[in-house]
Image: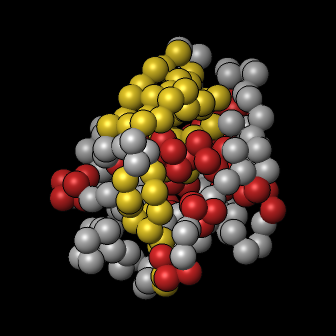
Amino acid sequence: MAVLPMHYIDKDPILRKKARKVKDLQSPEIQRLIDDMIESMYHYRGVGIAANQVGSLHRIAIIQRPDDPEPLVLLNLELTRKEGEREVVEGCLSMPGWQGQILRAERVWGQALDRHGKRIRFKGETDLLAQALEHECDHLDGKLYIDYIRDKADLYEVEVGQEEDGEGEVAPEPGPRAVEAASKQETLR
């Protein structure tokens, strides 16, 4: 496995491109990309990562909340339904040092394939999973969380590693196996 270079909002137009569906799920190239994305997500200390963040236009996202024992590999991720609305604090690995208050759905439903081609259906409800699913699906559609900023004051700079949890408290550092307290935060990096 290898750590892939992160692509940043101000430097790379690939983040604004729509990812293409993965057709040959079992190809060595796709399986290596999945492994490298997982390694990269751990390296950059994220809760999730989308393929275009590391320079690929394959429709692949990885999510691992602090309490998840294994990363959730999502190929050809699609959200099928959204319900409700809530305000969250969000950040992005492709824009380190910044956070913004945006609106996200309270509940999301979707589907994807796992790395072996098995269909996964899921529902995220008012938690980090719902937020992460929307955030990563947006990446795969060429959208960024800053597209949802309603007012300049809702986007603010923070010291990297000192992101807030949405309630004015400094959030614990997210990582692949972050402390249990981190799972209660609504901040996505």
Taking 177 as reference, is 76 above or below it? above
Name the spot of residue 155 as percent of width and height, x first.
51, 77
Q: Position of residue 86 (x, y in %)?
A: 37, 53
Q: Nearer the viewer, residue 125 or 182?
A: 125
Is residue 163 visible in the rendered image? The answer is: yes
Residue at image point 48% right, 71% down:
100
Instruction: Please say if 62 is above or below 149.
Output: above
Which residue is drawn at the image coordinates 77% and 35% (left, top)? Answer: 20
Task: Provide residue 42's location: percent of width, then percent of height.
Answer: 46, 55
Looking at this view, is 128 or 5 the one in front? 128
Position of the C terminus by quadrant:
bottom left
Q: How is the image coloured?
A: secondary structure
Q: Looking at the picture, does residue 40 appear above or below residue 157? A: above
Q: Residue at x 42, y 36 (%)?
A: 83
Residue 31 in which image quadrant: top right
The quadrant in which residue 143 appears is bottom right
Taking depth in this image into account, of 40 and 122 the one nearest to the observer is 122
Is 126 on the left or on the right of 92, as rendered? Answer: left
In this rendering, the count of numbered labels is 0
Q: Is residue 140 left or right of residue 145?
A: right
Residue drawn at (56%, 22%) of the image: 113
**Camera sees residue 38:** no
Asked whether 1 or 101 is in front, the reply is 101
Residue placed furthest toward the left: 181
**Residue 109 percent coordinates (x, y):** 45, 29
